[in-house]
Image (spheres, rainbow, N blue to C red):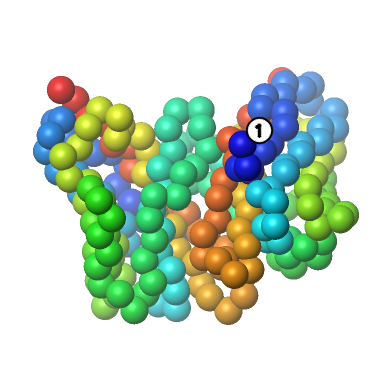
Amino acid sequence: GEDVEQSLFLSVREGDSSVINCTYTDSSSTYLYWYKQEPGAGLQLLTYIFSNMDMKQDQRLTVLLNKKDKHLSLRIADTQTGDSAIYFCAESIGGGSYIPTFGRGTSLIVHP
Amino acid sequence: DTGVSQNPRHKITKRGQNVTFRCDPISEHNRLYWYRQTLGQGPEFLTYFQNEAQLEKSRLLSDRFSAERPKGSFSTLEIQRTEQGDSAMYLCASSSDWKNTEAFFGQGTRLTVV
């Protein structure tokens, strides 16, 4: 995950918004993803954004992309205890295989 | 359930033994990926198949690792002469040609080498 970096931990109060940040290095990244992993489980694709977009909203999730700074963020509105998990940022390059490259993940802890 | 299925879910083996994992992708998904995830890390790419052809391999895939997808459906990942450093979660994902931007992951196989 050296091409994709994330902060390791985030703690928020239930009902607040959470913002998870990610930076990537490859300017030819075509797609950027957010995956969620709950304890002992596989990865669940939450949302993704094409590199020519700067924002995507899906219910409580908002993805912002700053391509110039190679910065991606995921905002979760009205964070719930069920949102506690590890969130992975990933990038892929088009042209065929679209193999996602992952960061180390941000552990989101939601407390009452 | 039509998601990606991996078996077994857990495997404990002695160092030096061979192990084989199986992945059944979502039906009609012709792309299949294997990843390895160690504690506190993100998934690391191992190898990628398009149908039965193995198109990419990571340098992480040492000579002791071999993956196959003989009929372009399920895939197996074999590790020979396991080492303690092979202990990890092995994840499989699949995607389709027409929506290759979305890779769906299985629950993983957790390998413990003792």
Is A90 left or right of B99, judged from the image as shown? left
Please name the residue that numbered disc 1 is placed on: B109
Examine the image and state in which quarter residue A2 appears: bottom left
Question: In the image, what residue occupies the spot 81% across and 65% down?
Answer: B53
Q: Position of residue A39 (x, y in %)?
A: 45, 28
Examine the image and state in which quarter residue A56 appears: bottom left
Is A89 left or right of B18, judged from the image as shown? left
Whether residue B112 is visible, yes or no, is no
Question: In the image, what residue occupies the spot 44% across and 74% down?
Answer: A30
Question: In the image, what residue occupies the spot 67% across and 58% down?
Answer: B29
Question: In the image, what residue occupies the spot 79% across and 26% down?
Answer: B15
Examine the image and state in which quarter residue B50 appears: bottom right
Is B33 left or right of A107, judged from the image as shown? right
In the image, what residue type sits under mark 1?
Thr
Q: Position of residue A69 (x, y in %)?
A: 26, 72
Q: Would you place residue B42 above or below residue B20 in this image? A: below
Question: Can you say which quadrant of the picture contains the C terminus of chain B?
Answer: top right
Q: Where is residue A108 in the image (x, y as percent from the top left)?
A: 28, 36
Q: Would you place residue B83 above or below residue A66 in this image? A: above
Is A112 left or right of B81, judged from the image as shown? left
